[in-house]
Amino acid sequence: MAVSTHAFHNTFGSLIGGLEGLAIGTGLDWIGWLIMFAFIVWMIFHERNLLQKQLREEVSNGLISPLQYQKALSPWTVSTAPFSGRATARFYQVCAELAHKKEQFSQHGNEKGNIAIIDSLRRELASLAPQVR
C-alpha cells in the first residue's frame, strides 16, 4: 500500500505539472500527513488502553507501584526513559512487553508458552522495580 501510494504521488506530480500540479500535490501531501498523524494518535491511545487494562493486576499484586503504573501509561515516559538510565528504560520496556504478552494470552491462550513468558517478565519486572522511581 505504501509503495502504491508513493508511486501514485510521484506519477501524479509529473502528469499534471505546473502551478496546478504543485497546488494539488501539496494538498494531497497534507492530507496524507493528516491521515498519518491521526493514525499515530489513535495508536498511542490504543496502546495506552492496553497497558492500562493489563498492568492493573501488577499494581494490585504489588509488583509495580501506582506511580510506576501511571508513568508506564505516559508516552512521554517511554520516550524519555532511556535518558533516566538503563534499568529505567528496561523497566518500562518490560512493562510494555508484559502487557502485550498478557493481551496475547487473553486472546489466544497459552500459545507458544505465553504463561512461561509472562512469569519470566514478571520476575524481571520485580527485580527492576526497586531501581525505578
Image: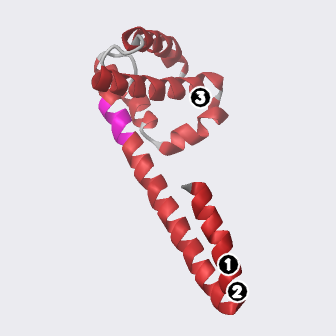
Question: Where is residue 13 drawn, in percent x and y?
Answer: 67, 78
Instruction: Tell me the residue that label 1 is attached to.
Output: 13
Relative to 127, is 25 above or below? below
Disc number at residue 58? none
Question: Where is residue 17 drawn, in percent x and y?
Answer: 70, 86
Disc number at residue 17? 2
Task: Please tell me whether residue 51 belongs to the stretch shown in magenta.
Answer: yes
Q: Residue at x 51, y 72 (%)?
A: 31
Q: Quadrant of the N terminus?
A: bottom right
* 77 or 4, nearer to the observer: 4
Q: Residue at x 30, y 17 (%)?
A: 109
Instruction: Tell me the residue that label 3 is attached to.
Output: 89
State the extent of the magenta-drawn residues as a range: 48-53
Question: Where is residue 101 drawn, in percent x and y?
Answer: 40, 23
Question: Where is residue 112 drawn, in percent x and y?
Answer: 42, 13
Q: Amino acid at mark 3?
A: Ala
SS of the residue under disc 3:
helix
Label 3 CA crowd tier, 10 Å (few <14, some 14–19, many 20+): some
Relative to 107, is 71 above or below? below
